[in-house]
Image (cartoon, coloured by chain):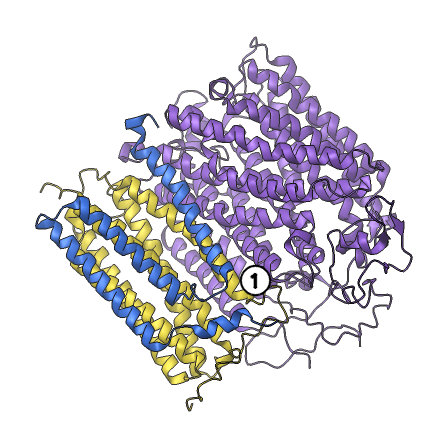
Amino acid sequence: MAETEYDKEHTHPGVGQYVEIGIILGVMTLLEVILFESFDRGFSTQVGIPALIVLTILKFMLVVLWFMHLRFDHKLFRRLFFVGVALALLVFGIVGANFYLGPQIGF
Amino acid sequence: MAVTAQEPVTRRSAFQRPTAETGFWSWITTVDHKRIGIMYWVTAFFFFLVGGIEALLIRVQLSRPDNTLLSADAYNQIFTMHGLTMIFFALMPLGAAFFNYLLPLQIGARDVAFPRLNAFSYWVFLAAGIFIYSGVLLGGLPDGGWFNYAPLNIIGPDPTATEAAGQVAVAAANHTSRMVFYSVGLQIAGIASLASSVNFIVTILNMRAPGMTLMRLPIFTWATFVTSFLMLFAMPVIGVALWQLMFDVRFGTNFFNPAAGGDPILWQHMFWLFGHPEVYILILPAFGIVSEVLPVFARKPLFGYSAMVFSMIAIAFLGWGVWAHHMFAAGLGPVANAAFGLSTMFIAVPTGVKIFNWLGTLWGGRIRLTTPLLFGVGLVAMFTIGGLSGVTHSIVPSDYQQTDTYYVVAHFHYVMFGGSIFGLFAGTYYWFPKVTGRLLDDRLGKLHFWLMLIGFNVTFGPMHLLGMDGMPRRIYTYADGMGWNLWNLVETIGAFIIATSIAVFIANLVITRRRGEPAGDDPWDARTVEWMTTSPPPHYNFAEVPQISARDELWHRKYVGGANKPPVRVPAGASPDHDPAEAAVDDQAAPAHGPGHTGHADIHMPSPSYYPAVAAAGMPIAGWGVYAGGPTQVVLLALGGLLILSGLFGWVLEPSAEEHV
Amino acid sequence: MAAQPEADMSAPLPGTDYEHSTSLGLSNNKLGMWTFIGSECLFFGALISTYLIYVGRTNEGPTPAAIYDVPFTSVSTFILLMSSLGMVLALAAIQAGEMRKFRTWILATGLMGATFLAGQFYEFTVFAAEQFNLTTSPFSSSFFVLTGFHGLHVALGILMLLAMWTASMMGRLPQQLHTTVENIGLYWHFVDIVWIIIFTVVYLIPAATTAPAAG
């Protein structure tokens, strides 16, 4: 076989890049805390909470794609993981919707 | 040089690696998927008999109105255990038995990806069965139904209820312990299934013989694959629900107790999120078996292989979108009910595809009426009936009348018994010669089939009528004059006919053991590669790993023929159509050389190990710790935890295969 | 042990040549770990969704806004996040054959994990003192069971990290076994990303959107 899967592994991030990502993660966490504290000072939760969710998703993706190496690995690993994530979001989303929206829309 | 017991290597550990290849301890320490499969089958069949006896007790109790054979409390335990036993300790492990035995053989591998994990799954399953039944000595068996709805599962029976007050008080006093046996017992069983599912998924993805692409997999391997994904994602959900139940009854949390703000509907959601994929876990192995059996005995390829594969995937995927059809009467609201009613109707489509494809497989074939074929056709017919009653459930207003009546009992027995069990017996008769080297007696097999078919329909057919006549489920007796007497009596007679058919089967097993006809490698003239090796296969499965160049590889090696030509048997198994570069060097991989010669110095097989059994043994001990109180609890939990951890550590530190000396 | 020279980047890392023994050229163990992680998504998904359903059911007990100490939890969150960095640095070290560095980082990762757990434990004792415990309300039950299971996963991870450190000290974790470190690292990172979600969804958002309980 010419190009194999573990050839790709050799484009993995170096130590420097890992530290950079670690710093970004730390900064994002700090941002989350700042956002949270700003709600007390009148910052709108309508804007702030979606912002918190976006930050969370970004941190999640950074760790999954870089630290867990999914970005550089065989596609199969990505599929195995994201099928689990998608299924969890789907079924528990429906259950949650049934609890919260149910009484309002007869769902 | 023969493959003999390997010399033990001196190791630093305190425990020597087991090396026995025969005898009791060789079974305890085996990591051979074939032996594990046999242990699964035997243990599961034992639990099937236990569940069957429970069923007979139920039927005798219900044969007459106002019967007094079983008290209400006893009845509740027995019908609950009948369901739990059949689902978790009979049907699932019977499926596992076939997965275990066949998967490596069908994909041309020597074992699964994680052989010790495989052994661990079996021992954990056995531990779970022992644990849950130990309740009979420790306060009673679970008694809230297999689905164990809240708030009954939290609060238990009211001890002050006047009816049959003595029994109710007993049940109430023992409620916590019964719920512990339920939640912890199923939890342990769930771990076995989860471990198996990881094992099989990795094996199928990563250990196929050269040339075996996914669309050349035997259809039963596809069934294994899809079922494993269902188990992988469903078991964690019931795991969480069971933990929450255990915390509620044992430690006072508030997940499902309405008096404390909990919501009983959450239990139903969590349970059925698992429970619906679970029923597909129960049926897909049988579907896979039938899809293997019908082509062989119709001497035709499976009709629409791709459609069969994609319909299995569709069933698995859609199966996640229908769970609330078990909750139509729970008050979720019209939008939810309509949505789930629609999705339930929709899931009938891929299943219907399979039914038609099985018919298409038989149509125009040269049918050989053997026992496996009869059971396979039985599945197609009985499952169709069960599927039709299922479709009537999908119409929500109609379901309001059917739910909680014997109509539902009829439906699920037609699909579980008429479907799953008939399929599993088809597989048993079909693969028995491969596993043991002997053929089960075909006349006794046919007697078994006909008795079972008749008995089954006599037992469960009238339940449709009883349900429509209003007989509720889960009642320990009924009053005279309801109009239910006749059919109940008929059903009980049917149950005993089923029991007779099982007795015939057991007799067949005994007789075959004594003087069964030797089978040879390929007694059925089959299509898939497990029939290329000896019966039973050697420890290492194949002398040479087969090179795969087609679906139904074995058939292509045995017969050559074009699209419109009838197949012609090729004597030496090498077909002129085959590219010699693709075909294996040893085309007939069944070794002509005897056991004294393997000539294969490069066959590395995993070594036996104590640790899976050690780790598994810790689980029921920890479980009894949850049941106990005071210092006993601490001791048992600690001991169980220690066994689990030391088993796992020992396992991780030992290599999967010892070096040859 | 002296540091090994930088590995030849054109050759496969030692211990990763699965070409000849597997259909996909992948490691069985790594595939198994990702498959298992897929199932864990459903496990934590069920726990988190139970929490979200019950977050408003406080039974006159403390609400999220009243009980959570977000600054304290942010510090332990940060520490757990940095432990993931420690984990990848440990992996990079063993892939490069630098055993002392590997042991330093794996120990650091374990210590950060243990610090996180200590913080959790302290948090729970404070809650208990404020009458907020396992049985107070559906909200409290779902909180403690969710974070309790997460903590259990962290504890098991720390055990595995210590086991690797010990094995390396005994010379039984050579460079060829870096895939073992990688797989345990996958588990560790997964436990971290569950916490990334928990921090926002369990702590921050509920604390921002519920009123403190009276009194």
Q: Residue furthest top?
A: B481
Q: Answer yes or no: is residue B331 visible.
A: no
Residue at image location 45% in from the left, 83% down from the top: C170
Q: Which residue is mark 1?
A: B612
- Assign a secondary structure to mark 1: helix
Residue at image location 71% in from the left, 36% down from the top: B358
Residue B145 or residue B229, whichever sits in front: B229
Query: In the picture provided, is B114 more to the left or to the right than B175?
Result: right
Instruction: Check disc 1 and give the amino acid type.
Output: Pro
Q: Is residue B60 above or below residue C196?
A: above
Residue at image location 68% in from the left, 29% down from the top: B382
- Image quarter where the C terminus of chain C lies is top left
Residue B150 or residue C28, whichever sits in front: C28
Q: Alpha-carbon neighbours of circle 1 within 10 Å: few (<14), some, or many (≥20)?
A: many
Residue B401 or residue A24, whichever sits in front: A24
Query: In the picture provided, is B661 more to the left or to the right than A9?
Result: right
Indicate the position of residue B108 as horizontal and vertical percent values: 71, 60
Indicate the position of residue B486 as horizontal and vertical percent values: 65, 13
Shown colour of chain C: yellow
Examine the image and state in which quarter residue B489 appears.
Answer: top right
Chain displayed in purple: B
Indicate the position of residue A46 as horizontal and vertical percent values: 18, 44
Shown colour of chain A: blue
Which chain does the numbered disc 1 sit on? B
Examine the image and state in which quarter residue B305 appears.
Answer: top right
Indicate the position of residue C104 as horizontal and vertical percent values: 34, 80
Q: Is residue C136 above or below residue C157?
A: above
Examine the image and state in which quarter residue B636 appears.
Answer: bottom left
- How many numbered circles does the render carry? 1
Q: Answer yes or no: is residue B376 visible.
A: yes
- Image quarter where the N terminus of chain C lies is bottom left
